[in-house]
Amino acid sequence: MIKVGIIGGTGYTGVELLRLLHTHPKVQVAAISSRSEAGQRVDEMFPSLAGQSDLVFSLPDDAILDTCDVIFFATPHGVAMENAGAFIEKGIKVIDLGADFRLNDKDEYQKWYGLEHTQETLLAQAVYGLSEINREQIKNANLIANPGCYPTAIQLALKPLIAHKLIDLSAIVADCKSGVSGAGRGANQATLLCEVSESFKAYGVGGHRHYPEIKQALGLLSGENIGLTFVPHLVPMIRGMEVTLYVDLLDADVDVQSVFEQCYKNEHFVTVLGVGKVPETRNVKASNFCQIGVQKAPDGNKLVVMSVIDNLVKGASGQAIQNMNILFGMDEDLGLEQIGLLP
């Protein structure tokens, strides 16, 4: 059995890790930590785990974490940066669900996250953990930077087009929507039910923290500079993320449907829908699956690509477990076979 430790277990991604790992046949969650809740039973904070878990929150420096094979950091930005190295030195693998190791440029990290990056050596060895793109690098990693939710949905939607050089890379438009759980579990007036219900708005139009991550990832995938307009929106639902991408085909006659189907034919967690089908967030709710639909606009060379994921699963904890499975040479789908909840 692989012994797992979770640092930062009181947020949505922490409890999502517990939910998913509970059904993993080759994993034992040995410890989950929280400074604020140390000593409290986990199922007292998360009653959904009543009768399923007897874990007690420990302190992040508890010795039991040193007995683990892998540590998940489900913590605010800056925590993994300062603490991951100590585990790696002991031969423990680290998967960071935050942004501390996603951006290759430490100055970009400081610009967008307001923190000085103090671990350049770790940053240089971190592997960006988008499983469907960096699978081979993940296999030998000591430190995995789990991608953000928007970057995951966007990259999966664009990978076939970029890999086959089918689109103009100078003017990609990403029109994206996310449920409120993406804002985290902390109390915030802007995410209260009365503030978000029956409303719909854009946010981060002048600059969202996922923007540099998306630009970096697409640039590495294409080997070229990317022109990107990225506008996220908050929609009044708990889970779910939908991205609608508008791109210009270099050849309007290309069979885009076949390109996508061929690209993802062997990817278990990416489903390309049939011609004319539109993905819905409810189809992937609580699952690690991504569904993609592609349609050409009626005239010209404009292509619309639609991608949906659950922001807490494929966009966070599920992808982290998928990366863990790859890292330890297990079947990628272990513990992740849940299909979308409907209705």
Image (cartoon, rainbow, N blue to C red):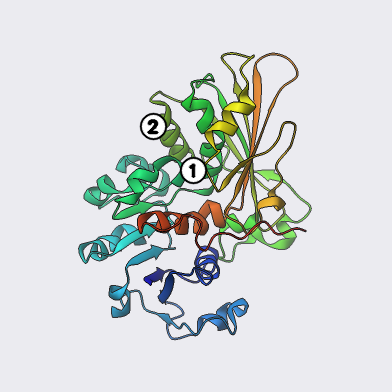
Write the residue at 43% across / 40% down. Answer: 133
- Front one among 189 and 213: 213
- Front one among 141 and 64: 141
Write the residue at 73% across / 46% down. Answer: 200
| Residue type at the position of mark 1 | His
- Front one among 34 and 251: 251
Write the residue at 75% across / 32% down. Answer: 276
Work out whether mark 1 precedes mark 2 in sequence or the reverse, and give the earlier one. 1
Quarter of the figure with residue 173: top right
Which residue position holds label 1? 210
For residue 220, the mark is 2
Quarter of the figure with residue 51: bottom right
Q: Position of residue 139 (x, y in %)?
A: 33, 50
Quarter of the figure with residue 279: top right
Report the mark closest to the observer, 1 or 2: 2
Give the secondary structure at mark 1.
helix
